[in-house]
Image (spheres, rainbow, N blue to C red):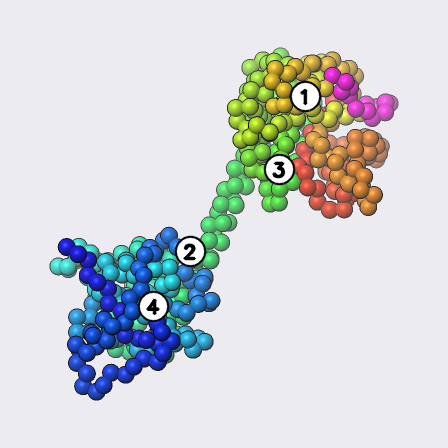
Amino acid sequence: MPAPVPRQRAIPAAEGGQAPAAAPNGGSAQDSSEARAAAPSENATGRAGTAPDRAETAAHTNLTLLLIEDDPGGSPIVPELLDQSGKPIRVRTARNLTEAERLLTDDVHCILLDLALPAPGRAGGGDDELAVLKHVLELAPRHAVLALTGADDTERGAEAVRVGAQDYLVRDELDGRLLSRAIRYAVERKRSDSAERRLAEGRVRAQENRRLERGLLPTPLLDGSPLRFAARYRPGRSRALLGGDFYDVVRTPDGTVHAMIGDVCGHGPDEAALGVELRIAWRALTLAGLCGDQLLGTLQQVLEHERPDDEIFATLCTVDIAPDGRRAGLCLAGHPSPLLARPGHPVRLLPYDNNGPALGLLPGARWPRMQVELGAEWSLMLYTDGLIEGRVGDTGERLGQDGMVEMIRRQLSEGLRGEKLLRTAVNEVRDLNGGELTDDVAVLLLDRAV
């Protein structure tokens, strides 16, 4: 059975910019119907829910009203309508929800729905008096909706607002000024509600992301170790908690303390996710007993499988501190060498002559493990290049490793230790840069005191 042809209400002012022609006195319903049939038809191709938010464009274009009402006699209930600037409001008419669905094009801003219209499947009546409204709200979730009731049915109109309509109007009280104002207010109210909903959804997503990122930061496993641990982390991405830098510290059952710090090239969420994967893989492999070249080779395989692009690589520094705390094994994969501070000795960098390539650059690469002496009392600082690549004042020069060593030496001489030392160091680097650092910064500090 073919679908009924939608009728267009004869309001040339809405569609052609002319004032509506007045029907002669005594004009019949047939005359009115013929006038409606003569109105130009409109393309009805859009569907609600797939177009951009119509309410947001209401302030920049003529408003369009879709009237959904069963009017077998053809008697118009909508007078001439003007928007706030005096432009005519276009009106389309649908006799049922099938026609309404076809007429919901992208330029419709508001729907005026007769609540007396039967909902699909309810021709014989039913218990839900607002079924037709609920159907329209599902059909057009982004449109403003005005409910139309009779004078003796205002209670149902109020209930319609509670269900989701922007307002309700009484049929017998309709006039052009009232309806025009109601349409404008409904469109603005829908726009405001939509904006508030998107803002609330954005807040929820941001909170969820923060909880997720905070949960992905490592919890050091140092139970039973005499070493003290501190860390400082500052992602380069705005409003992020996690960047491409990553670190971790664990103590294995034999008493060895393993520490790691790394940096995935790039600063986006993909790099942050890859950094988390590498950190978790490092912890699992370390607890399984791997270290040195064997561990880094396996991590490179993980990176090659998980990276979104073949150009992505990661630098890494690992140290494994013997149970007696006096010596450590060091592996470098394209990463800056750690800083060692000991009482009575100058602050210095650990050797980096056998620095291997970054992970993901050379298939089958090797990473030699160097043995270093720490002594009885020491502080060992691992860091990413975000700490040393900031600028120094107006000179344009970078802080560099030499500048970092001198800065840490001075801060240690001032009695700074642990968390306070790292916080002061990161803040000073930022101040020297003249503002926030664009790169991620991660710093890890292990101390052994006698």
| Circle 4: residue type | Leu
Q: Which of marks 4 and 1 is nearer the N terminus?
A: 4
Residue 324 visible, this angle:
yes
Quick one: quadrant of the C terminus? top right
Q: Where is residue 427 in the image (x, y as percent from the top left)?
A: 74, 41
In the picture of the structure, the residue carrying the numbered disc 3 is 267
Q: Is mark 3 on a helix, strand or loop?
A: loop
Q: What stretch is highlighted in magenta?
A: 342-354
Q: Which of marks 2 and 4 is nearer the N terminus?
A: 2
For the point 45% across and 61% down, the residue is 56
Whether 89 is drawn above or below 401: the answer is below
Q: What element carries label 4?
A: strand
Q: Which mark is residue 65?
A: 4
Q: Which mark is residue 181?
A: none
Q: Residues within 10 Å of mark 2 (few under 14, many from 20)?
A: few
Determine the image quadrant of residue 438: top right
Q: Report how far apart the C-alphas of labels 4 and 1 lie in the structure.
A: 66 Å
Whether 274 is drawn above or below 181: the answer is above
For the point 68% across and 21% down, the residue is 357
Q: Report how far apart the C-alphas of labels 2 and 4 lie in the structure.
A: 17 Å
Image mark count? 4
Cβ–Cβ under 8 Å for marks 3 and 2 = no
In the picture of the structure, the residue carrying the numbered disc 2 is 52
Q: Report how far apart the C-alphas of labels 2 and 1 lie in the structure.
A: 50 Å
Q: Report how far apart the C-alphas of labels 4 and 3 lie in the structure.
A: 48 Å
| Circle 3: residue type | His
Q: Which mark is residue 357?
A: 1
Q: Where is residue 398 in the image (x, y as percent from the top left)?
A: 79, 37
| Circle 2: residue type | Pro
Cβ–Cβ under 8 Å for marks 4 and 3 = no
